[in-house]
Image (cartoon, coloured by chain):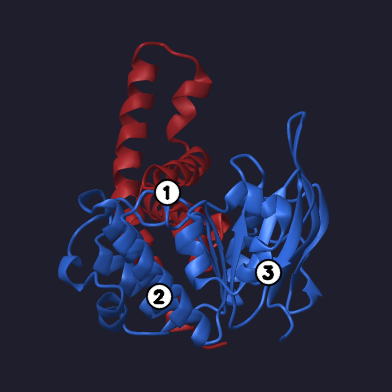
């Protein structure tokens, strides 16, 4: 396995008097889709935000290509090819989808906006604003942005939440396609069946820490994890 | 150093907003300051339309506007820090104030 592009190592985070993470770690390896499972409030999103530079950890470190990042922030990590897909509010409410795709096309020139829109099946509503899209369309539109960017590392927070199974399956195929291009993909979520379908590696976030469970098959061999997630 | 077109191209969206927003901010500040002055208000309120106040207000309004439009993560994913995105509005206000100072000197 190649070295991780991005890692958050042994990070802790307090919100006021509540400790959300005590020693959570996250590694994004090129060509892999890693899924981070965990109950609500277990610290999945916090860990992802710390890795993306959206939140500062109270302790622990973030490393990019093995080098420690001092005061990580998303705009700095973005230059190195990191893309953060939050659970909401990625797209501007006031720009059309085409305008937003063009921003990334002009800035990074990865894929053309048209190519990405076709690949994400959003080419028929390029002139719409996010407020005019359904949940599944919105998620596909966000992934079109990712496709234009062609990131080295994608951190996606609950991308399958609240969308139809057919859209979940389609998003999964895009994550797999990104990994096939060498992108390191990390996804969080609760949709066990859908996420297990396209995951290479499972990380379980529980009690403020993370456990590397291995492949989906290996994860289902873990007693506590199976009790919580297997049907 | 040559200007990196790819680096600045997306900022045209913000520049356009700043060019529209600055005259509106200037006019509003002028009217409010004039009203305060005619009503015998205090000096600090009347200084609302001083150039430093306008620049600070432009930066603050840019920050609010970017949040209102839900664009914080979008610009960060494009590699722009809040200093750049909000600073651009401040820079436009600074240039505008300088031009006004030259005209009304």
Look at the numbered discs 1 and 3 and tell me whether their residues touch, using CB distance below 8 Å. no
- Label 3: how many Cα within 10 Å (few below 14, some 14–19, many 20+): few
Chain of the residue displaying label 2? A
Answer with the quarter of the image where residue A183 lies: bottom right
Residue beneath disc 1: B66
Please report whichever mark, 2 or 3, sits nearer to the chain's N-terminal start: 2
Between circles 2 and 3, the one closer to the viewer is: 3
Q: How far apart are marks 1 and 3 (CA)?
A: 44 Å
State the SS at label 3. Answer: helix
Chain shaded blue: A
Front position among marks 2 and 1: 2
Circle 2: is it few (<14), some (14-19), or many (20+) Cα within 10 Å?
some
Residue A170 place in picture, x, y as percent = 34, 70
Q: Which element is circle 2 on? A: helix
Q: What element carries label 1?
A: helix
Query: In screen coordinates, is A16 left or right of B98?
Result: right
Residue at 50% x, 86% y: name it.
A180
Residue at position x 51%, y 57% from top?
A192
Residue shown at 48%/45% (left/top)?
A: B63
Query: Spatial distance from mark 2 to mark 3, Cα to Cα?
Result: 22 Å
Q: Are marks 2 and 3 on the same chain?
A: yes
Q: Residue B17 occupies which quadrant of the picture?
A: bottom left
Query: Mark 2 = which residue?
Result: A173
The subunit letter for the residue under badge 3 reads A
Q: Which mark is residue A218?
A: 3
Quadrant of the image for the N terminus of chain B?
A: bottom right
Contact flag, marks 2 and 1 (Cβ < 8 Å): no
């Amino acid at each position: 396995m190649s070295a991780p592009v991005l890692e958050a190592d042994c990070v802790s985070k307090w919100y006021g008097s509540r400790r959300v993470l005590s020693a959570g770690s996250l590694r994004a390896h090129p060509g892999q889709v890693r899924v981070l499972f965990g109950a609500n409030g277990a610290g999945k999103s916090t860990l992802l935000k710390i890795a993306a530079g959206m939140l500062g950890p109270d302790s622990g470190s973030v490393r990019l290509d093995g080098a420690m990042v001092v005061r990580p922030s998303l705009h700095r990590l973005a230059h190195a090819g990191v893309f953060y897909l939050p659970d909401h509010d990625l797209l501007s409410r006031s720009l059309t989808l085409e305008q937003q795709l063009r921003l990334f096309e002009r800035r990074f020139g990865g894929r053309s906006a048209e190519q990405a829109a076709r690949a994400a099946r959003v080419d028929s509503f390029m002139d719409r604003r996010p407020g005019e899209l359904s949940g599944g369309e919105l998620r596909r539109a966000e992934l079109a942005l990712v496709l234009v960017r062609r990131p080295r590392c994608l951190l996606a927070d609950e991308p399958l939440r609240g969308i139809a199974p057919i859209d979940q399956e389609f998003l999964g195929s895009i994550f797999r396609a990104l990994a096939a291009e060498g992108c390191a993909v990390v996804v969080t979520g609760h949709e066990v069946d859908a996420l297990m379908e396209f995951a290479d590696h499972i990380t379980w976030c529980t009690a403020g820490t993370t456990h590397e469970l291995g492949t989906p098959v290996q994860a289902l061999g873990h007693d506590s994890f199976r009790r919580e997630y297997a049907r | 150093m040559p200007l990196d077109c790819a680096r600045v191209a997306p900022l045209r969206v913000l520049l356009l907003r700043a060019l529209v927003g600055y005259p509106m901010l200037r006019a509003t500040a002028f009217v409010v300051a004039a009203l305060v002055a005619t009503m015998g208000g205090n000096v600090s309120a009347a200084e609302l339309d001083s150039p430093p106040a306008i620049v600070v207000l432009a930066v603050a309004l840019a920050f609010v506007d970017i949040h209102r439009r839900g664009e914080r993560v979008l610009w960060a994913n494009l590699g722009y820090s809040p200093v750049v995105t909000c600073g651009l509005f401040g820079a436009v206000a600074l240039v505008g104030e300088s031009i006004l100072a030259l005209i009304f000197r």
